[in-house]
Image (spheres, rainbow, N blue to C red):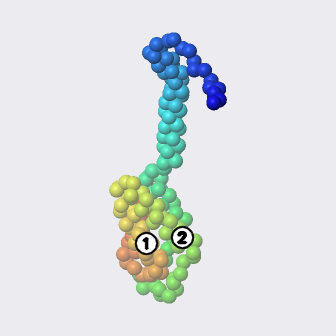
């Protein structure tokens, strides 16, 4: 029979307690590094989350809605006996601006209920513009309401 060459076992006469202490001392830097990395990672993730979630707020959305409606230009009013056929269409950019104003007002109202009247009035204006029904008394009244709300700031 052949004998297998096995490496000799370490001849350590130290008690088991000393060996455990030494093992825990060698793991301590690794554990501290892992904990520090976890904490640092959480801080970076929290910072990125906070920065990505920043919004201008409801005030900025409402202001942008008012500015968008203003840039849409004058909307026709055919309620006073004017020929409705003369005002069957507004420019596409005006339609887009009115729709954008409504969406911005809706976002503002979702964040802050104080902007609900603005969103509702712009919703009426938006429906009037999308259907090209400028003889709508409710739509024309909504335009006046929006202008008054926007003037308040």
The residue located at (51%, 11%) in the rendering is: 13
Q: Would you say 91 lies left or right of 18 here?
A: right
Residue for badge 2: 96
Q: Would you say 147 lies left or right of 97 here?
A: left
- Nearer the observer, 73 or 13: 13
Image coordinates of residue 99 in percent, x first then y, are 49, 69
Query: How crowded is the residue under tag 1: few (<14 C-alpha within 10 Å), some, or many (20+)?
Result: many
- The C terminus lies in which quarter of the figure? bottom left
The residue located at (35%, 62%) in the rendering is: 117
Image coordinates of residue 62 in percent, x first then y, are 45, 57
Label 1 secondary element? helix
**What is the quadrant of residue 140 in the picture?**
bottom left
Label 2 secondary element? helix
Report the Cα–Cα distance between label 1 and label 2: 12 Å
- The N terminus lies in which quarter of the figure? top right
Image coordinates of residue 54 in percent, x first then y, are 49, 47
Give the number of the disc on residue 125.
1
Q: Would you say 38 lies left or right of 115 here?
A: right
The residue located at (43%, 75%) in the rendering is: 127
């Amino acid at each position: 029979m052949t004998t297998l060459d096995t490496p000799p076992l370490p001849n350590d006469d130290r008690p088991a307690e000393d060996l455990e202490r030494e093992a825990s001392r060698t793991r301590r830097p690794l554990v501290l590094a892992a904990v520090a990395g976890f904490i640092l990672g959480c801080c970076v993730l929290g910072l990125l989350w906070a920065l990505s979630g920043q919004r201008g707020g409801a005030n900025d959305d409402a202001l942008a809605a008012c500015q968008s409606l203003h840039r849409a230009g004058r909307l026709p009013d055919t309620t006073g006996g004017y020929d409705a056929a003369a005002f069957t269409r507004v420019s596409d950019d005006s339609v887009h601006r009115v729709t954008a104003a409504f969406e911005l007002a809706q976002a503002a109202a979702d964040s802050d209920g104080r902007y609900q009247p603005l969103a509702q009035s712009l919703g009426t204006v938006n429906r009037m513009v999308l259907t090209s029904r400028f003889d709508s008394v409710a739509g024309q009244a909504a335009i006046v309401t929006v202008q008054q709300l926007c003037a308040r700031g």
